[in-house]
Amino acid sequence: MKKIKETGYSSNDIREIGPIKVIQINPGMFISSTETPTHLLEEMIDNSLDEMMSGNANIIAVNINTKNKKIAVLDNGRGIPIDNDVPINISTKLFTGAKFQDDKTVYGCVAGLHGCGLVVVNALSNNYKIEVYQNKKYAIYDFDNAELKVKNIIDFTDNIPFSTKIECCPDPKYFESDNIDIDRIRNRLSTASAELSTGNTFILNVDDKKEIFKITTEENFKMNCFDNNEEHSDIIKFNSKHGKEQFNIMFCWSSGPVITRNLSSINLLPVQDGGTHINLFQEVLKNYFSTKAKKLNFKFNDVDCLTGFRAYYILRLINPSFIGQAKHKLGNKKSELLVFKNDLEIQLENYFKKNPETLNLLLSKFQDYRNKILSSKLKSTGKKRSSTKLTKLRDCSSRTGELFIVEGDSAGTGLIESRNPVRHAILPLSGKIKNIVKAKDILKNKTMNDLFSSLGTGINTDCDISQLRYQDIFTVADADPDGGHIATLTIMAIATVTPAIIESGRLWIVHTPLFAINEKKIFIPLWTDLEVEIARNENRNIIRFKGLGEMMPHQLKTCILDQQTRKISQIKMTKHMKKLIDLFSKPETKRQLLNNELNFD
C-alpha cells in the first residue's frame, strides 16, 4: 500500500472558540444580512413583544439616535430576572432563555426561539447595556466589546420608569452601513399595534421626535396590500383557534393588478417570504373553487382564484419553524398546521352559502381571466399567447417595481439572494437566445415566451402598456461581446413586439463592469479604462470578472440593483426599425452595412 504523505495536521490545529467569537467571525449566520444593524434592534424588540404578547407588558418604546448611533428598547414587563446572573448569561451564552418549547410555563407563543438574540446583539456591539428594575432592585450590566465591565445592583423603592431596558451601539466594522432602517422598524411597530389588542402603547423616538402607533388590522392590510384607490370585493375574515394557537386571515379579491399580494406575521414577526401557512390556505381556496366551478359549469384553472388575491395572515404558533435566523419564511411541515385546515374549509363553505351572489361574481371574474389568457393571440400568426405560468421568474410584490432580465442562472441566483423582494423581480434567461426578430418567430422561443408573459402587456396589436407589471425593465448581461449580443437580441425582441415599452421610456440597459476594487469591505466598480488605470497607479487591489456569474451577491447588488451606484442607459426608439430588423435577419443587409451601402441617417 502506498504510504500517505505526512501533512503535519494534528490536534494542535484544532481550536475551540467561544460563542461571542463565533458570532463575530460569521455574523451572517446569525443575523442573515450584515447590510445594516437593523436586525440587532429587531432582536431587542422581539423580547419586549414576547412580554406584551404574553400579557405582561403594555408599553414598548424604541429609541434611535442617528447621531451617536445608539439604539435602545424599553418595556414595562416583568423585567429580566437578576438572580443567578441571568442578564449576563443571556448576553454571553448561546441557547439560553425562558422560551424553549419544552417549557411552556413562562411563555406560550413567542418570536424569540433560539436563545441567540441578545448574545448576537452583545457580540456585534462595541457597547451594550442592560438595565432592570425588579423586586425593589435596580440592576445595571455594562459590556464593552462584549466583555462585562460593570455589574451593579442596588435597592430601589421609588416609582420605576421601566422594567427592562436594552441599549447598544452596533460596531460598524461588522456592517456595510451603520444606519438603522427606520421605515422597517416603523413597520414592525405599526404591525404589532394593529395585531395586538387595544390598551397597548408603541412609541418610536428618533432623535427625540416621538411617534405613537395606533392602527387597526384592516388599515394595516390596506396600507400594505393595495394600491391607492384600488377597488376590491368585501373583506372576508376567518379565525381558527386551537388552544393557544391561532390562524387568522382576512382576504379579498382586487380589481387592480392580477398579481397576488400577501402580508403575514407569525407571533408578531413579519414573514415576508411566505411559507407553509400561505400554501395551506391557497390549497383550501383552489380545492373549493375547483369543485364549485365544475358544479356550476364555469371555466376554471385552479391558479385563477389567486388572480388579484389579497390576504393578511396573522398566526400564533407555539412551535414555529423559520427558515434562517432572519425568520422571513415559515418552514413548518404542512401536517403541523392541518389542525386549522378543517376550520378554514368549513368557514369558506359557510361564507359562500350565505353569499351565493359573491361566489358567482368571483367565478365569473376567474372565468373572464381564463378566457382572456386563452383568447389572446398573436395577430400575425393566429397562435395563442403563452401561458403566464412561469418557472424562473422571481416576482416582486410592488406594481412600481423593477424587472431585471439577466443573462445566466448563476447571476440570476445571486441577484435573487441580494434583492429586495418588494421592489426587484428577477428573470434569468434560459440558455442562448436565438437571433429572432420577426414577430411570428419570437414566441416560438421559450425564453422569449417567458419574458413576454412576465411583462403582462400582451404583444403586437394586443399590447397595452397600462398593463405593464413593472415601472421599469432592465437588461443585464456580461460586459463582453457575447453579453452585448444577448442584450441586443433581447432589446430587439422587445422593440419588435412591445415597442410601447421603449416609447414610454421604461426600458434600460445596465452597464456591468469588467474590473473592480476589492479590498476587505470596500468594493468599488471600475466602469472605464481611465478608472482602472488610476486604481492601478494607486496600487489598489483590482479584480477582473469573466462574467456576472463570478460576482458575489453584494457585488451584484452594488452594480445592478442599487440606484445610487449602478450605471444605466435608457433605450430609445429609432425611426429605422425596419432597417434594423433586416440587419439582424438578412445577410445581404449586413453586407451593405460592411460596404457602407446602408444609411441610418
Image (cartoon, helix red, strand yellow):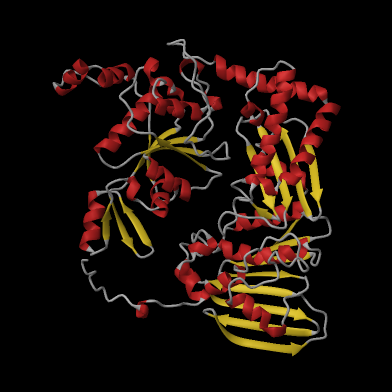
- Residue drawn 30% across and 24% down? 435
Q: Residue at x 63, y 69 (%)?
A: 115
User: In front: 495, or 192?
Assistant: 192
> Residue 422: x, y in percent?
56, 44
Q: Classify the position of the N terminus by image quarter.
A: bottom left
Q: Is residue 132 above or below residue 531?
A: below
- Look at 49% across and 66% down and name the residue there: 27
Question: Left or right: 227 with respect to 488?
Answer: right
Q: Examine the rendered structure and indicate whether residue 208 appears above or below residue 596.
A: below
Task: State which quadrant residue 276 falls in.
Answer: top right
Q: Image quarter for residue 287? A: top right
Q: Position of residue 109 (x, y in %)?
A: 74, 59
* Furthest residue toward right: 354
Q: Is residue 563 visible?
A: no
Q: Position of residue 255 (x, y in %)?
A: 67, 28
Q: In screen coordinates, is 530 left or right of 92?
A: left
Can residue 332 be seen by looking at this rendering?
A: yes
**Residue at the image point whose x is 74% and y is 23% from the top:** 292
Percent x, y of residue 158 = 82, 83
Please tell me whether residue 13 is drawn above or below residue 582 in the rendered image. below
